[in-house]
Amino acid sequence: MSAIGIIATLRVQPGKEAEFESVFADLAAAVRANEAGNSYYRLFKAGEAGVYKVMECYDDAAATETHRASDHFRTLGARLGPCLAGAPEIETLTAV
Amino acid sequence: MSAIGIIATLRVQPGKEAEFESVFADLAAAVRANEAGNSYYRLFKAGEAGVYKVMECYDDAAATETHRASDHFRTLGARLGPCLAGAPEIETLTAV
């Protein structure tokens, strides 16, 4: 099975950027520490103010499910939600 | 200086996918072998037929210039060009 890439686009409310970045740093650390099936997970700022993109890569579909069902994703995701200006856009890709 | 992320979107002509993927594999191997300032370079297929995305990360702006000026990028890029259906779209991001 091919690896799976994800590009997540997140729009953060004005004034919430520092809180968002702080919580996301904890999430990224937890992903790296706990998800053997994740090979890449990094947060970037886009050119547009308040827009962030997460580049992600997982070994297979099961690893993406492990990520979404993890305690750290649920707990820290719940803290990210109030920082956002809308639902995340998730683009799913297939590694070549 | 922050690391730099790039998401490159490439549209490949119908029937050119295999050639594109083969040449790109050589390019990715050359990037990994020769660019100390590159930390990520991976090709993915998008949901839309013929659309590919490259996730890239460089240590700094100088490393992106090293990439673009490299012999392998110029030589193999020239072989990728005829496979494409249009100019690549390049989105430049700043690592958080």
Image (spheres, coloured by chain):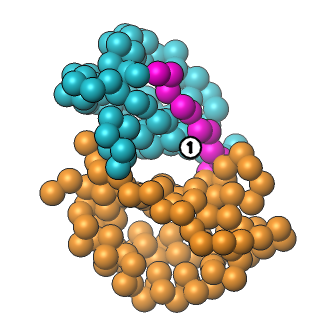
Chain colours: A orange, B cyan
- Quadrant the C terminus of chain B occupies: bottom right
**Amino acid beneath label 1:** Gly
Taking the view exactly as shown, the residue that stands out farthest to the left is A1
Depth check: give the residue in front, B55 or B95: B55
Q: Main secondary structure of the magenta part?
A: strand
Residue beneath disc 1: B5
Question: Residue sitting at 82 percent across and 68 percent down?
Answer: A14
Magenta span contains residue B57: no
- Is residue B16 in sight in this rendering? yes
Q: Residue A34: horizontal and vertical position, in percent?
A: 36, 77
Q: Residue A36: horizontal and vertical position, in percent?
A: 29, 70
Q: Residue A95: horizontal and vertical position, in percent?
A: 28, 48
Other-residue count near label 1 (Cα within 10 Å), few / some / many at <14 / 14–19 / ≥20: many
Tell whether B85 sits left or right of B29.
right
Local secondary structure at mark 1 = strand
Which segment is the magenta one?
A: B86-96
Question: Residue sitting at 72 percent across and 68 percent down?
Answer: A12
Q: Residue A46: horizontal and vertical position, in percent?
A: 67, 49
- Quadrant the N terminus of chain B occupies: top right
Please state the total of marks drawn on the protein image. 1
Question: Residue sitting at 50 percent across and 27 percent down?
Answer: B88
